Amino acid sequence: MFKTYEAMMGILTDQMCAILGEHGIGFKKDGVEKNLDCYGKNKASLLDLLRKHPKWNDDVLGIVFEAGGIRQRNQTKIDSLRIELEAIANEVFEKNAAKHVGYDVSEFIHALCILCNENPFISGSSTVDHVGKLTDVDCEIGERTSRVIDKLCKAYDIDKHADYIAVFAPLADALNPISISHKAVLSLHPCDFLRMSAGDGWDSHFRLGTHDNRGNLIAGTLGYMNDAVSMVFYTVEETAKTPYYEAHKANSQIFSYSNGALHQSRLYPNYTDEAAQTIYRNIVQNVIAECLGEPNLWRLLKPGYANDAIFKTDYPLYQCDDYADKKYGARSSLLKTKHPKGFLGAQQRFVIGNVAYCVRCGNKIIDKHRLHCNACVGRS
């Protein structure tokens, strides 16, 4: 834990200077501090939010997940929550007896029991047949089990009960275990933004590189670092030690969060890996919901919807289609308790990216290909 804000900034300055020096990028302390001052002011709210998580590590300015089961399936917990949901169903059926003429609450409960003993995704035709015959609710093999339960509850107005979300949200989590093969970090550390493309056998146009081998969007590393919404999520080998920003990353991805809206940008190195995308999104959604003290219920928006409805990328560093274009797998999701209608108002959209400052003199960077302003290019 940093003793003071000033102590934190002093350590971060030294760490950033070391990274820049390692990559042969000319800098002065004033230029580095100008970026960190912007970072400190803009990231303050996001830092405060993530610090509420039980796995927060102030030394790395991030949340660290060890390889293995992040969230294990707990059948005892599932059964306990199922019983609570059955009690709600009994209450709703009794209250709405006239509306549900011809239906027996025992059929609903039987279907719920079947679903609560299923895999995270419907795995067999017998489940499809039994649920359909008992309740007239359609489901199909491969459909997420928790979504079928939600659909079932909505068919009988159980979702309108005041306690429904408080029971269904943890049940949905319990039915959807999360497991990863690498150590994972959700970071707000400035050096993780600088080294977001330090891949294990891969790099990207954000790479710091050396001299003539730098990425053509390296100013974007500072742009992400200096905004109010962006976090770096990445995975490293299980044996990796701190500082994690020095480790080569198996995967790396920017997430941006504001006011109940989460945007998941392009996954590096393989944006077509939908399984990894889903796991990483589930992890970050769970983190945000837990830090907010809200039920972990999100609405995943259709690909391509995000660009107009969720965020803006006004700053010139971000005139690149990695972030929003659906062909790169970018997705946005909304926390249901904050956005029950499933969309954001125009005034709620947030900006990804911010001004980047020359690491030598502290003036604004205009050219997204460099970490220097035009006046400082070529200086030793």
Image (spheres, helix red, strand yellow):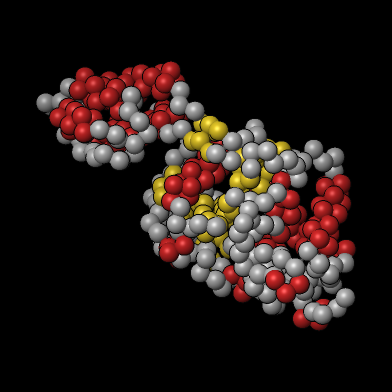
- Would you say residue 277 is visible in this rendering? yes
The quadrant of the picture occupied by the N terminus is top right
**x, y percent for residue 292:** 57, 39
Q: Name the residue located 67 percent from the left edge and 51 percent from the top edge.
A: 248
Q: With 16 as the anchor, is 71 left or right in this view? A: left
Q: Tell me how many marks there are.
A: 0
Q: Name the residue located 70 percent from the left edge and 77 percent from the top edge.
A: 366
The quadrant of the picture occupied by the C terminus is bottom right
- The quarter holding residue 186 reads top right
As drawn, 155 above or below 76: below
**x, y percent for residue 201:** 62, 56
Q: Could you say which is closer to the camera, residue 245 or residue 281?
A: 245
As drawn, 376 above or below 177: below
Q: Could you say which is closer to the camera, residue 55 or residue 228?
A: 55
Q: With 134 as the anchor, is 147 left or right in this view? A: right
- Would you say residue 37 is visible in this rendering? no
Q: Name the residue located 50 percent from the left edge and 57 percent from the top edge.
A: 270
